Image (cartoon, rainbow, N blue to C red):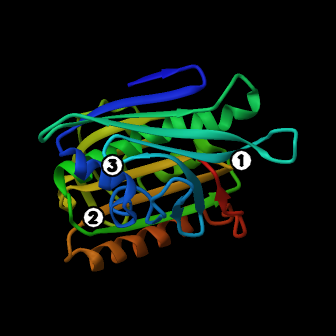
Amino acid sequence: MTSSPRQFEQTLDLQAPRDAVWKALTDADEMARWFAPRAEADLRVGGEMVWEWTDFYRWPQTIETLEPGSHLRTRYDSSVEDGEGGKRPLFVDYFLSGDGGTTTLRLVHSGFDEDARFDDEFDGISSGWPTELGSLRHYLENHRGKSRHVAWSHVALEMDADEAWATLTAPDAIGCGVAIADVEAGAAFSFSTADGDAFEGRVLRAGTREACGVATSHGDAFLRIWAGSCGGTVNVWTWLAMYGDDVADAARAQQTRWDAMLARIFAGKILENAPAGEGTA
């Protein structure tokens, strides 16, 4: 993975045929199995691709290049004004290569420059893409073709992000401890929440107020906990993506417990009418 100034780039080798990777990037049902819970795709040059995280976030893009199995390029409006009544554009390119059962995906997110107004967006995508591409790898290599059921609880807060992270990871909440953000990829994790949910697995990625991994205790589910800024507001997430036709009830029950936990630990700090975002986190 490389990241040059004002352009983010990541390359990964996936143990999946190229047509499966292309489908995961362009088919609405497939995108909803590794990325946003809801997706739309009008697959043509000039068509729109939309990723939605319910009422929390909406990310619409226009398809500029469509070379099936090889290259997809999308364009969307940044939050930075262009001085002419519009927004300056940003671009996401996906390049695929390889034959047989291994595919190389190179993602390039560009259009940023040294303008400080791009800082939040650039920092957001630089932090977010490694996690999301980790989810893509996990889906394609372990759960390809299976339905996904997500337990996802989130709140916007009137508090500092570090304090939010410490509160979320404390023994009376998730129970994993703030230091999980410093754990190296591949390391084992094991913790129990205040509600008695026991999680075991291995870390895929950890960073600033974030950790994600594979919860082997929950059928190789994709687990992510996060606290950070989105659109200038501090948010926290708890996310457990479970695969299979028989896990829907378990996912709903997990979300119910997490919803209650966030309401309890952040009582008095939750912003009830925080605006939904659009663009890139």
Q: Which of 32 and 27 lies nearest the eye of the viewer?
A: 27
Question: Residue at image x 71%, y 63%?
Answer: 275
Task: Identify the mark nearer the N-term, 3 or 1.
Answer: 3
Q: At label 2, which amino acid type do we have?
A: Met
Q: Which of 165 and 10 lies nearest the eye of the viewer?
A: 10
Give the left or right position of residue 268, taking residue 181 as reference: right
Q: Residue furthest left?
A: 100
Residue annotated with mark 3: 135
Q: Which of 25 and 264 lies nearest the eye of the viewer?
A: 25
Q: At label 3, which amino acid type do we have?
A: Ser
Pointer 3 local density, CA inside 10 Å: few below 14, some 14–19, many at least 20: many
Question: Residue at image x 41%, y 53%?
Answer: 171
Pointer 1 local density, CA inside 10 Å: few below 14, some 14–19, many at least 20: few
Residue annotated with mark 2: 242
Whole-angstrom CA distance, mark 2 to mark 1, is 30 Å
Q: Marks 2 and 3: which is nearer the front?
A: 3
Task: Identify the mark nearer the N-term, 2 or 1.
Answer: 1
Q: At label 1, which amino acid type do we have?
A: Gly
Question: Residue at image x 12%, y 40%?
Answer: 100
| Disc 2, SS | strand
Give the left or right position of residue 107, taking residue 189 as reference: right
